[in-house]
Structure formats: structure tokens, C-alpha cells
Amino acid sequence: MTAFGFIGTGHLGSMLVKKFVETGAIEAEEILASNRTQEKVQRLAKATGIRPASSRVVAELSDVIFICVRPLEVRDVLSELAYLLDFQKLVVSVAADVSLENMGALCPARLARAFPSMASEKLQGATLLAFGDNATREDRGLIVGLFQAIGKAEVVEEKDFGTLADLTSCAPGYFAALMREFVLAAERREISAELAERLVKQTLLGTAMLLEEESFAGLIKSVATKGGITEAGVKVIEREAPGMFDQLFQTTQARHEQVMKNIEGQR
Ligand SMILES: NC(=O)c1ccc[n+]([C@@H]2O[C@H](COP(=O)([O-])OP(=O)(O)OC[C@H]3O[C@@H](n4cnc5c(N)ncnc54)[C@H](OP(=O)(O)O)[C@@H]3O)[C@@H](O)[C@H]2O)c1
């Protein structure tokens, strides 16, 4: 039986534990978890049946250890537990901007990075995965399988994590921000914001379902008849949006570079 450990049960760590247990991807009794603030992990244990423990015990008794702390906290966690994280262990970090190379300099374990999305709360998130050279074929199969259970898993080039994370992990926030602007524009046209939000949300859900079988271009084609109203609206988006999205990527890329610099500065 594989033993799984989670260090850090904040927003992401607790979501992963809950969803892996709920979907049966991992049995509750196979999971040990620790958190800096005890109450948080105790609450999670009560809700899911997993076992709370210290990080040392998690590292000692688990075969696969998920590191779910913030990027600038990874160094402390890995260097403190390095003596337990040998080649027998698989360490999977979910932290943004902490590279496999950064992790490899801190502990000799087999390594992987996962970048999940909170959309996995609804079993629909896309998780980005990258593996260290020392990860085995079994490691890859195991981790891909776990994240497939709570959405879709994509093994990608580690160098693309930053840009791709905008499309997956950050995107629920971006979509919500865009739709809020849509609602606010309707409100400026004297439509109640509450009614507009309700209608947009329902339409968004239906659109997501249509997109299960349709490309974006295909859906635009079927909704925007030639010379019609929707086509005129789509043209406005095609004119205005490229600059906004280019700026978004530039801004988030600069933030990633700053965080990576801060991580390098911890050496
Ligand atoms: N949230 C997302 O949508 C998302 C998506 C993809 C990746 N991520 C990555 O996931 C990581 C966690 O993000 P989050 O949103 O879950 O942050 P969070 O809610 O702040 O969770 C971090 C948790 O780590 C705990 N922690 C910190 N240092 C610790 C230590 N030394 N030992 C044990 N536990 C420790 C914190 O404990 P306390 O209770 O004491 O604060 C906190 O509960 C980040 O690296 C982020 O890049 C997040």
C-alpha cells in the first residue's frame, strides 16, 4: 500500500486531500497530513478521516509527499526534512515558481511538480505536471492517475508552467473578472446587476457544456451568423481583447520572474 503525505493544508492542500478522498483516488487511511497551524489539519482530519501528524512524521512514513506550502516556504520545509526525503520518496510540489532544479538542490528525493486548479473542487480542473529526470515510469503513472481522478492532467514542459498556469490555475479568476465586467456594462445600461449576473452565469455554464464538443472557433461560427448582431459583438472583442491578454501575460510573467528571483535569493 502506498502511503501519501500532505505538508500544508491551506486552500489547495485541503482541496486536494478532500477530492482525492471523495473520488476514492486515495483512501483516507492512506493519508497523513501536517500543517503549521494545527487547527487547520485537525479540521481536515475530522472532515475526511485522514490522520493528522507532524511534518517529520509525514515525511518519515509517506512514500509520496505533496508539498502544498507557499513558494517562499518550500525551501524551509525541504531543507528541514531533507534527511528523510531520500531517493525512496517521491516529492510532489504544487508551489508556483519553485523549479525541479531548486527542489533537487535541497533534497535527494524523486521529484515532480504539479500545478492544480481550484476548478478541481468540481472535478473539472486541468492540472499541469512535470517530472524530474529521477522520477520513474510508475511515479508518472501514479501522479497522472491521481490528477485525472479530479479533472484532467497534462504533462508539459516545466519551462511553460508560468504561461500555462495563466490558462488553468489563474483562469477561473480571469473568467470571473471578465464576466463581472460584462455584468457591470449591462448595469450601466440600467439592467439590474443581480439579474445580469444570474443570466450570465447560466449562459456561461451552458457554454462550457457546448465547448465539450466544440472548438471556440466552431462555437463562434454557430452563434455568430454572418452579418448578424453576435458577429458585430465578436468583432469588438477581436479588436479590443488581444492587447488586454498580451498585457495580462506580460504582467503575470514579470510577477513570476520576481518570485523566482526571491526564491533564488533564499540560497
Ligand atoms: N490556490 C490555488 O489556486 C493554487 C493553484 C495552484 C498552485 N498553488 C500553490 O499551492 C501552494 C499553496 O497555496 P494555497 O493557496 O493553498 O496557500 P495557503 O492557503 O496559504 O496554504 C499554505 C499552507 O501551508 C501551511 N504551511 C506553511 N509553512 C508550513 C510548514 N513549514 N509546515 C507545514 N505547513 C506549513 C500554512 O499553514 P498556516 O495555516 O499556518 O498558514 C497554510 O495552511 C502555493 O505554493 C501555490 O503556489 C495554489
Image (cartoon, rainbow, N blue to C red):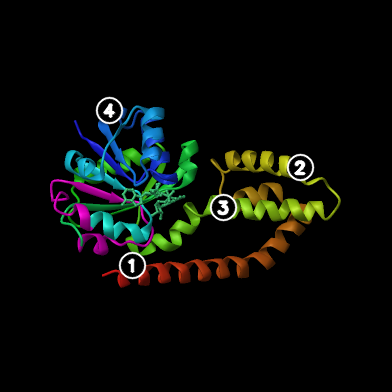
Tell me residue 14's x, y (percent). 40, 40
**Considering only order in the chain, which callout, 2 or 3, is on the residue closer to the N terminus?**
3
How much space separates mark 4 and mark 2, taking CA atoms?
44 Å
Label 4 or label 2, whichever comes before in sequence order: 4
Q: Are marks 1 and 4 in contact (CB under 8 Å)?
A: no
- SS for dot 4: helix
For marks 3 and 1, the one nearer the N-term is 3
Mark 2 packing: few (<14 Cα in 10 Å), some, or many (20+)? Answer: few
Q: Would you name the residue on which mark 3 appears?
A: 173
- Answer whether residue 23 is visible to the viewer in this image: no
Reply yes or no: does residue 98 show up in magenta.
yes
Q: Is residue 93 above or below residue 253?
A: above
Q: Report, in whole angstroms, how far the alpha carbon at label 3 lies from the one at label 2.
A: 19 Å
- Which quadrant would the N terminus be assigned to in this image? top left
For the residue pair 85 and 243, the one nearer the viewer reads as: 85
- Which label lies toward us, 4 or 3? 4
Determine which residue is flagged by label 4.
29
Per the image, the residue denoted by label 2 is: 194
Q: Amino acid at mark 2?
A: Glu
Q: CA distance from mark 4 to mark 3?
A: 34 Å
Residue at 27% from the left image edge and 58% from the top image edge: 76
Tell me which amino acid carries mark 3.
Gly
Q: Amino acid at mark 1?
A: Ile
Q: Mark 2 or mark 1: which comes first in sequence?
A: 2
